Image (cartoon, helix red, strand yellow):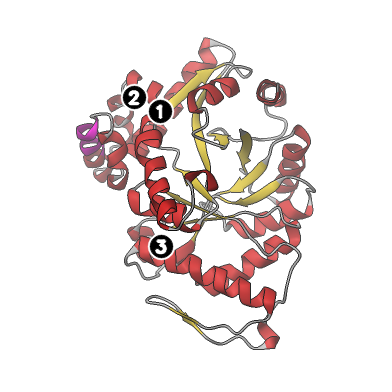
């Protein structure tokens, strides 16, 4: 199993320092989320200041950009990273696409499928100097003069990971993608009994195997060497679980364990913006189902034991910041490299 980090940085110096430190410690990849920042300027700095570590967005919001826009920026990232770049894509949800990005929303799984096919068509044309002629239900692209063609690169086969929770996107990952980002709001049962079989079904339709898809996730980790440290972290994780559990599209994960009614109650509290009342609805049983607890040299082996061969990549839902608990991170990595 590979272990990665999520980049949590706001300044140029923080990005440079975190990238170098993550590579020096031995992490396998650096992921950037699309939350407070556009991920791609940060990734350009990661590429410049590292030599071996993989990197990519987890995730970039596909529908906030046209396929051509995404094709250009991913092509450049693959060029700058000398083959280390992984393109992570996600749909986001309808309110954010329409009300935050002011972009159209319809048939998200079908649209993302066509989006990925468009990317592959564009990249193939650039690499082999072939005519652009993509015509789909959502996107039509037929103009690519030499002036706008960036030309071939050394590593044109850019891996595409997508993220999701429900069946349609899981099947799409199996059909077309190199990897699948399992949402942090998941359980082992949901991963084993829902996500992997759905990915396998999509793969079978395309003559592929579920083993052709890399499964990656961010794990809720209650880490600390003392009971006080773990208690504080446990409350933070409880709050995060409550936030995710209030989202209607994530309800199937709760229903897997008979907790659907709790999701309904959390959703009503969220609508009323009663955030402080939400964590009390998350029981200790729920916390222990979603999260893993241990000291810094216990948490990695615990992740490996819980997930077995269900996952190939894992990231702790904890910010990695150089200078903050470096010894703990070293112990964590040493425990999983034994």
Q: Position of residue 69 (x, y in %)?
A: 56, 72
Q: Earlier in the sequence, mark 2 or mark 3?
A: 3
Q: Which residue is mark 1?
A: 290
Q: How many marks?
A: 3
* Residue nearest the viewer, comparing 92 with 226: 92
- In which quadrant of the rendered view does residue 294 lie? top right
* Residue nearest the viewer, comparing 9 with 43: 43
- In which quadrant of the rendered view does residue 108 lie? bottom left
At 21% across and 38% down in the image, what residue appears? 264
Tag 1 and tag 2, C-beta contact below 8 Å: yes
Does the magenta segment cover residue 263?
Answer: yes
> Is residue 99 shown above or below 179?
below
Q: Which residue is mark 2?
A: 286
User: Could you tell me if residue 65 is visible in this image?
Assistant: no
Helix, strand or loop at disc 1? helix
Tag 2 and tag 3, C-beta contact below 8 Å: no
Check disc 1: other Cα within 10 Å, few if <14, some if 14-19, many if 20+. Answer: some
Mark 2 vs mark 3, CA separation in Å: 32 Å
Helix, strand or loop at disc 3? helix
What's the magenta region?
A: 259-266
Q: Which mark is residue 100?
A: 3
């Amino acid at each position: 199993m590979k272990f990665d980090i999520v980049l949590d940085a706001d300044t140029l110096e923080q990005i440079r320092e975190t990238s170098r430190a993550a590579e020096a410690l031995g992490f396998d990849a650096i992921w950037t989320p699309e939350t407070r920042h556009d991920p791609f300027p940060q990734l350009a700095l990661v590429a410049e200041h590292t030599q071996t570590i993989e990197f990519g967005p987890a995730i970039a919001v596909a529908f906030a950009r046209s396929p051509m826009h995404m094709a250009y920026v991913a092509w450049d990232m693959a060029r700058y990273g000398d083959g280390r770049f992984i393109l992570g894509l996600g749909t986001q949800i309808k309110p954010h696409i329409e009300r935050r990005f002011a972009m159209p929303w319809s048939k998200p799984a079908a649209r993302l499928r066509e989006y990925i096919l468009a990317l592959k068509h564009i990249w193939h044309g650039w690499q082999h100097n072939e005519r652009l002629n993509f015509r789909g239900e959502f996107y039509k692209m037929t103009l690519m003069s030499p002036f706008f063609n960036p030309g071939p690169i050394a590593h044109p086969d850019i891996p595409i990971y997508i993220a999701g929770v429900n069946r349609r996107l899981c099947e799409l990952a199996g059909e077309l993608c190199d990897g699948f980002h399992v949402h942090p709001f998941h359980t082992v049962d949901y991963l084993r009994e829902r996500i992997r079989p759905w990915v396998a079904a999509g793969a079978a339709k395309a003559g592929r195997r579920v083993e052709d898809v890399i499964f990656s996730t961010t794990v809720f980790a209650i880490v600390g060497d003392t009971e006080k440290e773990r208690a504080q972290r446990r409350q933070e994780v409880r709050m995060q679980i409550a936030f995710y559990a209030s989202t209607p599209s994530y309800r199937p994960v709760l229903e897997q364990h008979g907790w659907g009614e709790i999701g309904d109650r959390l959703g009503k509290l969220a609508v009323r913006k009663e955030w402080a009342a939400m964590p009390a609805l998350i029981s200790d049983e729920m916390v222990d189902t979603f999260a893993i607890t241990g000291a810094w040299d216990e948490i990695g082996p615990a992740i490996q034991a819980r997930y077995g061969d269900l996952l190939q990549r894992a990231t702790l839902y904890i910010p990695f910041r150089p200078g903050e608990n470096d010894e703990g991170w070293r112990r964590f990595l040493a425990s999983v490299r034994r």
